[in-house]
Image (tube, rainbow, N blue to C red):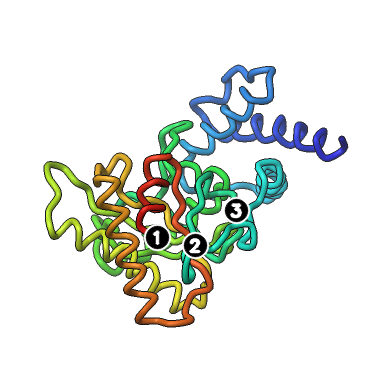
Amino acid sequence: MGEKRAQHQRLDYLVEEFKADSVQYKDLETPKDTEGKRRILRSLMNIRMPKVLSNDVLSVQDEYLVGRAEEKGIVRLYDIPVIRDELSIWQGDITRLAVDAIVNAANSQMLGCFVPMHTCIDNCIHTFAGVQLRVECNRQMNQLRIRHGKDYEQPTAIPMLTDAYNLPAKKVIHIVGPIVQYKLTPELEKNLADCYRNTLDMCLENNLKSVAFCCISTGVFHFPNKRAAQIAVSTVDRWLSQHPSAMERVIFNVFKDEDKEYYEALI
């Protein structure tokens, strides 16, 4: 009961602090119910530009998000069965996974989703990691702009590695998938394969032994789900055969039943 009460107190404190931090919404009426307060806090976190937060507020945010992760239920590697070789399928919220790295389907700005309460994976990961993640992404992008010019955007299939902060995972690998605007082309298929290959290369370089892939590009980027699954599995299979014992586990994280069926048919 004590931790539950503490979480309520943290939530109340954070809502007021994030409101005060936002000039536009400082006078926003706070809902009475817990779910309403969570929505307000998440929305204020989503729209917040990358900037330093006071250590006092940051400390409470971290305690609150760690508590939220425990409430949602942390899923560890031994909870996920191996289907064959080092491959697994897991359906659910990727922010629950305690693995070495989870993969975020990012956009070319690499700062997360600014749409309040949006259900995309980019929004979920940034929300439950905490505001530090956007700050780190912004710092890395600023360094890249110094090198490549002020208009630099992250290219398709080039991964960026960050800490995971308050997520159960150790790291987040952010990657921009290909966008299918009109029809699927061999180049777009190659780009998607590169996303998986380059991410696994990054795992190898950083001694990350377990990784959970989301269904890259299949949401608002309109890559056909079935073809995306085929490319994902074949690319990962090929990479694992070329790098034996490099990975303890590669997890295909799916959210929709449709994607789960595609992956189950392939593995």
Compared to residue 27, the image places residue 49 above or below, namely below
The one nearer the camera, 141 or 242, is 242
Question: How far apart are the two marked residues, 2 and 3, measured between alpha carbons?
Answer: 25 Å
The one nearer the camera, 244 or 132, is 244
* Amino acid on which disc 3 is placed: Leu
Which residue of the protein is positioned furthest toward the right in this rendering?
A: 2
Residue at 57% over, 59% down: 81
Task: Read off the residue under disc 2.
Answer: 83
Task: Read off the residue under disc 3.
Answer: 167
User: Residue 107: percent from the left, percent from the top?
Assistant: 32, 49
Lower sequence index among marks 3 and 1? 3
User: Residue 119: percent from the left, percent from the top?
Assistant: 45, 35
Q: Residues within 10 Å of mark 3 (few under 14, many from 20)?
A: many
* Amino acid on which disc 1 is placed: Ile
Residue 190, picture quadrant: bottom left
Q: Residues within 10 Å of mark 2 (few under 14, many from 20)?
A: few
Which secondary structure, mark 1?
loop
Where the N terminus falls, by quadrant? top right
Residue 120 numbered tag? none
Task: Read off the residue under disc 1.
Answer: 267
The one nearer the camera, 80 or 208, is 80
Which residue of the protein is positioned furthest toward the front in this rendering?
A: 265
Q: Are marks 1 and 2 in contact (CB under 8 Å)?
A: yes
